[in-house]
Image: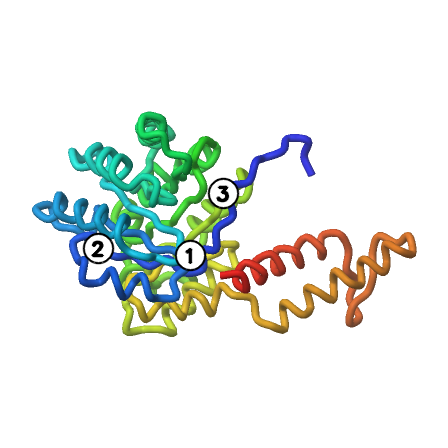
Amino acid sequence: MSFHVITQAPARLNRSELAVPGSAPQMFEKAAQSDADVIFLDLEDAVAPDDKAQARKNIIKALNEMDWGKKTMSVRINGLDTHYMYRDVVDVMEQAGDKVDTLLVPKVGVTGDLYMVEAMVNQIEQGKGYTTRVGLEALIETALGMANVEAIAQFGGRLEALHFGVADFAASMRARTTNIGGLNPHYPGDQWHASISRMVVACRAYGLRAIDGPFGDFSDPEGYKDGARRAAALGCEGKWAIHPSQIALANEVFSPPEAEVTRARRIIEELRKAEAMGKGAAQLDGRMIDAASERMAMNVLVLADAIAAK
């Protein structure tokens, strides 16, 4: 490891993240009873301009009055280029800031975007005397954000995670695509691979969680799972669900299979035996395992333990 040690963001189980419009309070109870690891109550794209003020009130009321269980609760505020954003932060934080785990900041393009939100959150928490600490998460969904993703990942402070917002990113890049998160059949592979990979590298380099965004066609579960598997292969630890039917799909893909958990435990056991004999490596099922194998195995076991504790 480098001598330069990076502080890791708080660990949160984030296999499935359900998006719920703040303008649709009739959906809140079903969301609260779902198996989603994370819920973000949305004030941005899913809410029409005329409904934003009421959506904000709906969210504050729901955060204060409903039982959301052990779910991580997030609120997606409006972009910094709108006049809704400052009121989102002020009202949500002042009236329900001790019930919120994270604020999801859309269309982050430069570190100054996060600085502004963090400064507001700091002052409100101090002023209200909250003992809780709200984290920030950044949506990387513009060409500017992706061009600056390494710098954004290094912001520090309250930043916990980066999310890949494929729809707005496609629009920003003027990319041709079939649907939100879908593949273009004329591209030889996955046209989102390079961007997601770049974001994940930035996240892992600077201690953040990496989350894949939406898949728009909720009538195509296999397409969703294929996208989730590709994101998982690149190192993402979860994916958005824009429909309740996608929650189970995300939980399935981002949960390690029992056979994988069993093998991870065996790797740790064999390496401990090797250590007792003064060896730095061992063999398991005809393959060499070493310290790198242990680190990979521990990733699996930490996730499995978090799922078991949910």
Residue 62 locus on image (x, y percent): 24, 52
Mark closer to the chain start, 2 or 3: 2
Label 2 or label 3, whichever lies nearer to me, is 2
- Residue at left offset 37%, top offset 34%: 130
Q: What number is the disc on residue 70? A: 1
Query: Local crowd at mark 2 within 10 Å, few (<14), some, or many (≥20)?
Result: many
Q: Which amino acid does label 2 sit on?
A: Pro
- The answer to whether residue 292 is above or below residue 113 is below
Q: Considering depth in this image, is 97 or 140 the residue closer to the camera?
A: 97
Query: Local crowd at mark 1 within 10 Å, few (<14), some, or many (≥20)?
Result: few
Question: Could you say which quadrant of the image residue 102 lies in?
Answer: top left
Q: What residue type is labelled 1?
A: Lys
- The answer to whether residue 255 is above or below residue 45 is below
Give me the C-alpha separation between circle 3 and circle 1: 21 Å
Label 3 or label 1, whichever lies nearer to me, is 1
Secondary-structure class at tag 2? strand
Label 2 or label 1, whichever lies nearer to me, is 1
Q: What number is the disc on residue 208? A: 3
Q: Considering depth in this image, is 103 or 123 the residue closer to the camera?
A: 123
- Residue at left offset 29%, top offset 42%: 106
Position of residue 75 in the picture relative to residue 56 (left or right): right
Query: Local crowd at mark 3 within 10 Å, few (<14), some, or many (≥20)?
Result: many
Count all numbered tags in the image, as a single digit: 3
Mark closer to the chain start, 2 or 1: 2
Q: What number is the disc on residue 21? A: 2
